């Protein structure tokens, strides 16, 4: 049986857990390691998945998904290291932490895959990028991909690109939520009730995302089709350019990339 253990069932761990359950993984295939009894009881009730000790998780599962915060990975690995063997597959979703970090702390030959998913896993629309470490073979990469495919799209990229990936798609949903939040505020400013403004903006976001994804057309072309000569859109675009929104996005995503690199060096 392809058994799984999720270490750290926080926001991302739960998003993956929910997707795995929707994809038909049965409760006896999955265990979680969760520090708080109340949270464990909530997850048991919602997903019928048991919380166990780290040692039980390693004994139960072949695939070990590390979904704790980057700053907690070291302590977790110290406790797991004597138990993990090259027959396990370690899948890390921790931002910034390189596979080398794991390999230096685990027994020789343990395969490690670094993955950057995102929270749209909750609605089976995740973007996940997988990279293999030194001991990861094709079968390990394929297993990680198979694990993530039910919750969205999966790509394989070199690990050298994972910090940039983290900044783009790992954090990416937050930028869109931020934009939507600001646009809803603009509706309030213009006297539209919040629920109505939210409906208008969320449906526009959904439609725009669908066009980008399905039409395969360049975003510039799609924006130009909305921008009528002498019209309303160009008046808004002028303000966005005047306020340096494009440059702000470039700087923001570069800062996220730099933080990912930094997280990999801090612990
Ligand atoms: N949130 C996101 O969109 C994404 C997150 N990630 C990565 O996923 C990881 C988790 O992030 P996120 O879900 O946001 O963070 P959370 O803090 O929500 O989840 C991490 C959970 O792990 C728990 N934890 C810490 N140490 C242990 C341990 N030794 N054993 C069991 N549980 C433990 C934490 O407990 P406590 O609360 O006590 O600290 C917390 O509940 C991070 O490494 C992040 O970089 C990757 C892609 C996207
Ligand atoms: O903010 C973070 O550090 C995590 C990693 C990518 C998305 N959330």
Image (spheres, rainbow, N blue to C red):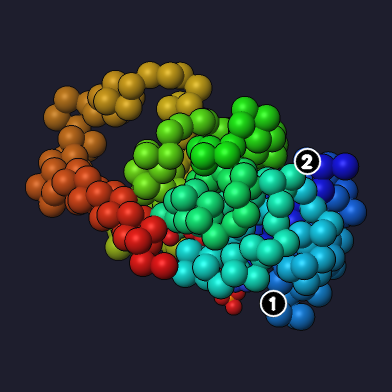
- Relative horizontal placement of residue 85, taking residue 187 as reference (left or right): right
- Closer to viewer: mark 1 or mark 2: 1
Q: Quadrant of the N terminus?
A: top right
**Few, some or many residues within 10 Å of mark 1 (<14, 14–19, 20+):** some
Do we see residue 223 in this rendering?
A: yes
Q: Residue furthest bottom?
A: 37
Residue located beneath label 2 in the image: 23
Please tell me in which quarter of the rendered image ligand 2 is found. Answer: bottom left
Across and down, in percent, residue 25 comes to 83, 45
Q: Nearer the viewer, residue 43 or 232?
A: 43
Label 1 CB-ligand 1 distance < 8 A: yes
Which residue lies at the image location 39% right of the left edge and 58% below the top edge? 264
Element type at mark 2:
loop
Q: CA distance from mark 1 to mark 2?
A: 26 Å
Q: Quadrant of residue 215?
A: top left
Could you tell which of marks 1 and 2 lies nearer the N-terminus? 2
Q: Nearer the viewer, residue 102 or 225?
A: 102
Q: Residue at x 17, y 25 (%)?
A: 229
Going 65% across and 35% down the picture, which residue do you hit? Answer: 140
Q: Secondary structure at mark 1?
A: loop
Query: Which residue lies most toward the front here?
Result: 108
In the rendered view, tell whether residue 153 sits above or below residue 51: above
> Marks 2 and 1: in contact by CB < 8 Å?
no
Disc ID at residue 164 = none
Q: Position of residue 24 (x, y in %)?
A: 83, 42
Q: Residues within 10 Å of mark 2 (few under 14, many from 20)?
A: some
Q: Could you say where residue 186 lies in the image, as x and y percent from the top left?
A: 31, 58
> Which residue corresponds to mark 1?
35
Q: Quadrant of residue 81?
A: bottom right
Seen at 71% across and 80% down, the residue is 36
């Amino acid at each position: 049986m392809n058994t799984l253990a999720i270490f750290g069932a926080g926001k991302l761990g739960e998003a993956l857990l929910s997707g795995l359950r929707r994809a038909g993984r049965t409760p006896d295939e999955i265990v979680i390691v969760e520090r708080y009894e109340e949270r464990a009881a909530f997850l048991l009730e919602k997903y019928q998945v048991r919380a166990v000790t780290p040692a039980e998780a390693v004994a139960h599962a072949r695939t070990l998904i590390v979904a704790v915060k980057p700053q907690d990975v070291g302590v977790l690995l110290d406790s797991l290291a004597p138990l993990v063997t090259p027959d396990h597959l370690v899948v890390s979703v921790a931002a910034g932490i390189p596979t080398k970090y794991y390999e230096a702390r685990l027994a020789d030959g343990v395969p490690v895959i670094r993955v950057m998913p995102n929270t749209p896993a909750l609605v089976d629309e995740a973007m996940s990028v997988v990279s293999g470490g030194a001991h990861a073979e094709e079968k390990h990469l394929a297993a990680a991909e198979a694990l993530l495919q039910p919750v969205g799209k999966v790509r394989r990229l070199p690990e050298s690109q994972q910090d940039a990936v983290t900044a783009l798609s790992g954090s990416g949903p937050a930028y869109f939520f931020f934009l939507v939040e600001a646009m809803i505020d603009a509706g309030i400013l213009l006297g539209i009730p919040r629920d109505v403004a939210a409906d208008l903006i969320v449906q526009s976001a959904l439609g725009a995302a669908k066009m980008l994804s399905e039409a395969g057309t360049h975003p510039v072309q799609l924006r130009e089709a909305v921008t009528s000569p002498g019209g309303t859109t160009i008046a808004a675009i002028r303000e966005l350019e005047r306020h340096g929104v494009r440059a702000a996005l470039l700087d923001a995503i570069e800062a996220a990339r730099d933080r990912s690199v930094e997280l990999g060096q801090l612990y």
